[in-house]
Amino acid sequence: MESKSDAFVRIATQTHTTSASSSVVDYAIEMRNVNVYYGAFRAVKDVNLQIEARKITAIIGPSGCGKSTVIRCFNRMNELIPGARLTGEVLFHGKNIYDPDVDPVQVRRLIGMVFQKPNPFPKSIYENIAWGARINGYRGNMDELVEESLRQAALWDEVKDDLHKNALALSGGQQQRLCIARTIAVKPEIILMDEPCSALDPIATLKIEDLMRELARDYTIIIVTHNMQQAARVSDYTAFFTVDEDRAGVMVEYGPTNQIFTRPRDRRTEDYITGRFG
Ligand code: ADP
């Protein structure tokens, strides 16, 4: 009998082929009426958001407006937080990833995540890449996969002679690119990045931003950033969130990054991007 995870991967792959060949806008993932609660507190209110495939979408807004909570909804990471609860739907190729027949482990393989602080395993560079692929049942040539993933993450040239050195010896920027390589190695469709540069210096930050633009040829990227210049530099679309009178996070405005930064439609967006608030 087909397992839950096989069924989810099959649905994702089948519909992916169909949507890629159609001329209408190809949405990688979509939130419908999403609310997130921590206990009785509603942290995120009624979010509807369609993310275009193979583009970079930035989520911006003042601290506490729910950016991290929202990005965690895209791969069911909130359910690892005790007391967190979601209502609404997150549709991935038309399938709600919160349906009871969907395996969250498969969701997190297809929708990977890179965190604020680089978190390589205390193992070799090679093992950092190979480990995830191996537990996902990868049976191809591991050396090739490691090289390909490190090349895609723009790290290969810097580490190719040190593959068996401990990953923790790398610089912060290199560690973050290694974490991106590890995410890519399991062949996701979407990469979520929660403040991926906040622990990095400006040079390392620019390298990650260049890398994101490269990766957007093949992957859909959603990034949370508190850095408005970063959102303006790197993203195609921007979603601006703020807190409402109940302290719940709400999405105020969403559109092409250029429009949000030059012709915001909502006064609250304008106040934020011009530095009057937040
Ligand atoms: P942002 O990323 O925009 O700073 P968060 O998503 O971290 O915002 O937080 C949104 C709201 O949810 C805040 O009021 C925060 O205090 C609350 N919150 C976040 N994580 C938790 C948690 N694990 N338990 C309880 N409340 C939380």
Image (spheres, rainbow, N blue to C red):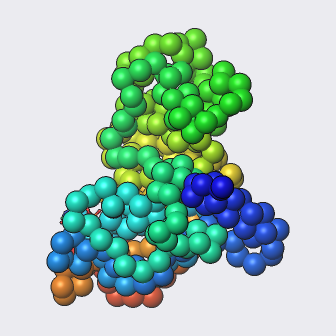
Q: Residue at 61% across / 60% down in the picture?
A: 8
In depth, the one of 40 and 219 nearer the eye is: 40
Judge whether 8 appears above or below 259 on screen.
above
Q: x and y percent of residue 29 in the render? A: 57, 69
Tell me the residue at 55%/27% (across/down). Answer: 130
Residue 239: image quadrant is bottom left
Q: Residue furthest front?
A: 1
Q: Quadrant of the C terminus?
A: bottom left
Q: Is residue 152 left or right of residue 85?
A: right
Quarter in which the N terminus is drawn? bottom right
Among the 4 quarters of the image, the one containing residue 256: bottom right
Q: Residue at x 54, y 49 (%)?
A: 109
- The number of callouts visible is 0
**Residue 182: x percent and y percent?**
52, 36
Closer to the camera, 190 or 169?
190
Q: Is residue 82 visible?
A: yes
Residue 269 position, x and y percent, is 36, 80
Answer whether residue 153 is visible to the viewer in this image. Answer: no
Residue 85: x and y in percent read 30, 71
Residue pictured at 37% horizontal, 37% vertical = 118
Can you tell me which quadrant of the image ligand 1 is in?
A: bottom left
Q: Is residue 6 left or right of residue 260?
A: right
Asked whether 229 or 41 is in front, the reply is 41
